[in-house]
Image (cartoon, rainbow, N blue to C red):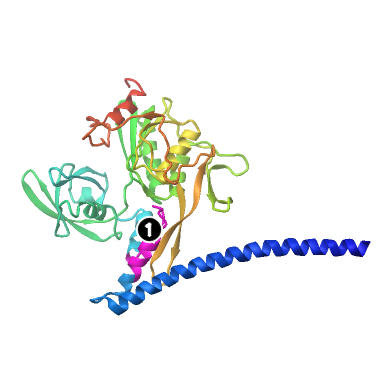
Amino acid sequence: MTIALIFLSVTATFAITMTVSQKIYNGLVSRLSNRSELYDGYSTIDDYVRTNFYGDFDDDALFSNTAQGYMKGLGDPGSFYMTAKEYIEYTRRMAGEGGIGVDVSYDSAADKMVVDRVYSGSSAESAELKKGDVIIAIDDKTVDSSNAYEVMESLQVGRRFNTVRVTYERGGSRKTVSVVRGQARTVTASVLGKNGYIRITGFYANTAEQLSQELTALTDQGVTALIIDLRGCSEGLVENASAAVDLLLPSGAENTGAIASAIGKNGKVVMNFTSDTQCVTFPKGIVVLVNNATSGAAELMTAQLRDFSKCTVIGTKTAGEMTLQKIFEMEDGSAISLTIAMVKTYNENSYCDGKGMEPDETVELASRVQPSYDLENVGSDNQLEAALKKFGSD
């Protein structure tokens, strides 16, 4: 009887093992088959091109464009391919390098780029650039609608200590100056009465430090209410955003101290974002301004503040791209950014796959109105006005 029971047990175990193994094998075969079909498809196209294409082509360019197409096929904004040169620039940008110390905007109707702000102590200030200067050219490249974004980026990003030549116009006179790139500035602030305003344009390695400096300056001025403007903010990493928002939050969950977590495809925690017990507070509260271009790291900051009942969110629904990326480097110096996890907040909220965050108060920006990025010139920015109304007449 004992021998028979052992035999039956072994037989049952063997049968279960074989069933599980068969499922695993079938899954592997299916995936290998799909991959083989994918490679065969690429190979077939390559054969047709090399045999029949009328003209010459560059194999490096062909690979680069193929890699870009593959990553775009994922349909995920956080996953993309970078050439070796693009990867170097990306690394510098995430490190917060390359700015000359100005904020600029391009007026497409007037076809001109204007300096909106010059930061104190920056190389732009040393070169005597001023608010209101009209930038005509960068490194002898004339600014127009076709290259405005590229020019704006060149003023914010680049190799540190490199020099950029800026031609500008002021009061009818034109001048060219050489400006040395330094640290990118992503946090700016202004004050109106007891109301403070902070705009964040990206979350880089130095953003938390800049935010800390601005928060200290605001509290030293007796500010009792704060507006954080994250409209249009889509650059940077969620880990940098978590480091920044830590300045405004208490400690996180017990045991882990987490204020948010990145969850992988297998349901396991890839990374915890933690907070300490010290935080800057504002008696009248915080308002965060968002819109449909607020994504990724900026969404995480907003969600973390709301989870801890630290803010009121005003504006329009966010982009829904609150995910974690990992960089994989290639042998040729190129790299891919790949989304490896979705981020869940302290209260288990997740805003990804295009499912953005609904604001507490929906306020559409009025037609043909440009956002005002300081409290000195609120203008017709009705979203910023709605935020100020939350704090009363102060």
Q: Say whether residue 273 is left or right of residue 212.
A: right
In which quadrant of the rendered view does residue 105 lie?
Answer: top left
The picture places residue 192, in percent across and down from the top left corner, at: 29, 28
Query: Is 324 located above or below residue 260 in the figure?
Result: below
Q: Is residue 77 magenta?
A: yes
Q: Which residue is mark 1?
A: 72
- Callout count: 1
* Residue at the (40%, 64%) spot, across then down: 335
Q: Say whether residue 230 is left or right of residue 268.
A: left
The picture places residue 266, in percent across and down from the top left corner, at: 58, 53
Name, please, the residue furthest toward the left: 172
Q: Please rate how many residues cluster around mark 1, counting C-alpha atoms within 10 Å: few if below 14, some from 14 to 19, many from 20.
A: some
Per the rendered image, the range of residues in magenta is 63-85
The picture places residue 339, in percent across and down from the top left corner, at: 46, 54
The picture places residue 208, in percent across and down from the top left corner, at: 41, 45
Query: Is 384 located above or below residue 101 in the figure?
Result: above
Can I make out residue 111 in this image? yes
- The quadrant the C terminus occupies is top left
